[in-house]
Image (cartoon, rainbow, N blue to C red):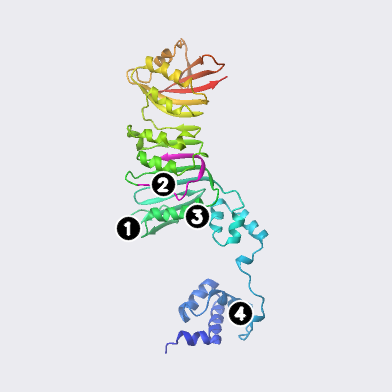
Amino acid sequence: MELSSNFIKKNQHFLKSCILYEVLQKKPIFDSYRNFCETVGTNVMEYPDFEFWYYRFYQRELDFDYDRSVDPEPKTLVDMPVVLMKTITQNLDSVERARVRYMNHAIKAVADSFPPVVEKIDIVVTAWSMYGTLNNKRFEFFRKGSGYERNSSEAEESDKCYMEKGTEHLALMLKTPKIQANHVSLQILEETLNLNDFLPIPFNTKSIFVNGRTTNQVVQSLSAMNPGHLESIRLDGGFFRETEYWRMVFETDQIKQAKSVELPPMGMKAEDLLIFSHLKSFKCHLRSENTFEDVPRIRDILSTFKELESCEFGYYGVLDGSSIRVFAMALGEEIPIEPLFEDGRMIITHRYQIPETNERLEFKLKDDGCLCRVNIIKTR
């Protein structure tokens, strides 16, 4: 005959006998509780009560009529001393601390007292998945039925939009008050993907790498960073093919307030260097139709940059290729009879005194296969 749940709940001796039976089987307590629930019902006894009687019987205290009301009230997480909370949270890394702070208000206040600094956030978004690492802790979400192959045990398949799941996961960390990251890497590998609301709130990072397929993706990614804190920006990806649009990137406050910018090989012209006038350093690629006209122009433009400390660019002359000799001659540098070589490649150095100052630009030219690699340092 099937017993009703009301009868079982009222028959405490019967329940305790079932618990004693589980103890005698010498199974782990979690397995015992699972078996107990399958036997008598999932709503008959809560786990804390099961745990109490399990350990009493385990210690051979077999009084079924023991009065629990004489025991002191059990402590909960809220009753934990602040000193102990602090000891626990200070031994967690930033990612673990961000999750713990959602447990209760007391431990949240303690967790928020530590500087929320993350060394590195790495995020990759494709048409069917979002994955990456927060510090060294990997996460991975992918679209159900996409045929996506899991790369780790942390991968999670869901009916819910993988972007939404991934954003929720990131929000635990990124919504921490005054969160800061030393470096953020965003790789957007799907050209049609719109990144609006991709990151929950703007946050602080010192440097960022963005690999985007479109200009809009790059702009959206940069816009998720607080411009006043961002110092170094490196960009890559298919967006540089959109020559009529990529200037939108340089209209962002993030670029305008950065100290260092590195661009992909997009074949900029000499006059395009003006967009770097506020920077301390930058890296790019230049393309010229006339080396003897453009190289002096490049030198003159750079000599007006007040904040410039150093820069690097790959130079390609349409008519003369990567000829380091032609570039040096355009600077007015004499070609040495026995030039210096480094790693089997020619090196030529040129120094230019900036008019009406005690500063000068030191050009180091290096033959680099299809390019002339140019490194410039401002000296005083």
Task: Quickly name the residue at label 2.
Answer: 124
1 or 4: mark nearer the eye = 1
Distance between mark 4 and mark 2 Cα atoms: 52 Å
Task: Quickly name the residue at label 3.
Answer: 172
Q: Give the mark nearest the N terminus, 4 or 2.
A: 4
Task: Please tell me how crowded label 2 is: few (under 14), some (14-19), or many (20+) other residues with Cα within 10 Å.
Answer: some
Tell me which segment is drawn in magenta: 194-211
Distance between mark 3 and mark 1 Cα atoms: 27 Å
Q: Quadrant of the N terminus?
A: bottom left
Distance between mark 3 and mark 4 Cα atoms: 41 Å
Residue 203 within the magenta-colored segment of the rendering: yes
Residue 221 within the magenta-colored segment of the rendering: no
Q: What amino acid does circle 2 point to?
A: Val
Report the side of 363 relative to 240 (left or right): right
Task: Quickly name the residue at label 4.
Answer: 57
Q: What amino acid does circle 4 point to?
A: Phe
Observer-nearest residue: 298 or 157? 298
Q: What amino acid does circle 3 point to?
A: Leu
> Can residue 152 be seen?
no
Task: Quickly name the residue at label 1.
Answer: 145
State the residue at coordinates (32%, 32%).
244
> Can residue 250 be seen?
yes
